[in-house]
Image: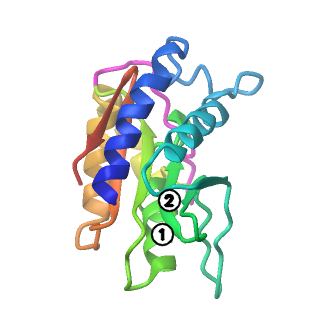
Amino acid sequence: MLDRATEAIVMGLTTAIRRMPKGFYDSFDFTRTGNNLCHSVTLGALASVVSSIKGVAYVGIDVRLNRDGLKFQPDIVGFGEDGDHAVYVDFESPNSSDARVPWKDVDAYLSWSGPKLETPYIVVTSLPDRETSTWELRWTADGYYNADHKERRSEIRANPFRYWSEAWRTAMAGWDLSTVAIININGKKVAQASL
């Protein structure tokens, strides 16, 4: 199911984002107060794409699957006809495609799933795969998500996708990622990232 869901999301998003404004996924223009559209608009597109995946009967948005003190709240859950979980999807807009992905997204999924991994989990990120001198790095104060990366802004700006995907691979080394995929939106291009 992971491969089928990943392929469907890559293809569906490729079509859905064609009409998005320039800079929707490779700038911070649509993640600012008063124009914070990236996350909500993309969730709408993803809900439509997920609903078209074979085996998905209906879709839930912002589903809270918390149990036994474990918090897992994917942006989208594709449900099968009998209510079983067919696929989980989280979307990270440009302002949250950073050091949070391994622990906030993937580790939350793995901890919640326990040793019996069955339902595929897909994280969609938004990172330019090229140099960009205007790329921002937020949450860098001591104790915040990106504090360990604040001295590496120039490296991040040289290629945000390359920098963060390598950071994620390092952070998730040794984890069972057999049911996990990361898809990246690079401007108007959508592709699966290697883990």
- The answer to which of marks 2 and 1 sits earlier in the sequence is 2
Q: Is residue 101 among what the camera can see?
A: yes
Q: Which mark is residue 171?
A: none
Q: Mark 1 — residue?
A: 109
Q: Is residue 164 among what the camera can see?
A: no
Quarter of the image with the C terminus in it? bottom left
Q: CA distance from mark 2 to mark 1?
A: 9 Å
Question: What range is drawn magenta here?
Answer: 130-143
Give the image quarter of residue 46.
top right
Residue at the spot x=64%, y=88% of the render?
A: 68
Q: Nearer the viewer, residue 128 or 62?
A: 62
Indicate the secondary structure of the residue bearing disc 1: helix
Q: Which mark is residue 88?
A: 2
Dot 2 surroundings within 10 Å: few (below 14), some, or many (20 or more)? many
Residue 157 within the segment the image draws in magenta:
no
- At which x and y percent is residue 38? 60, 29
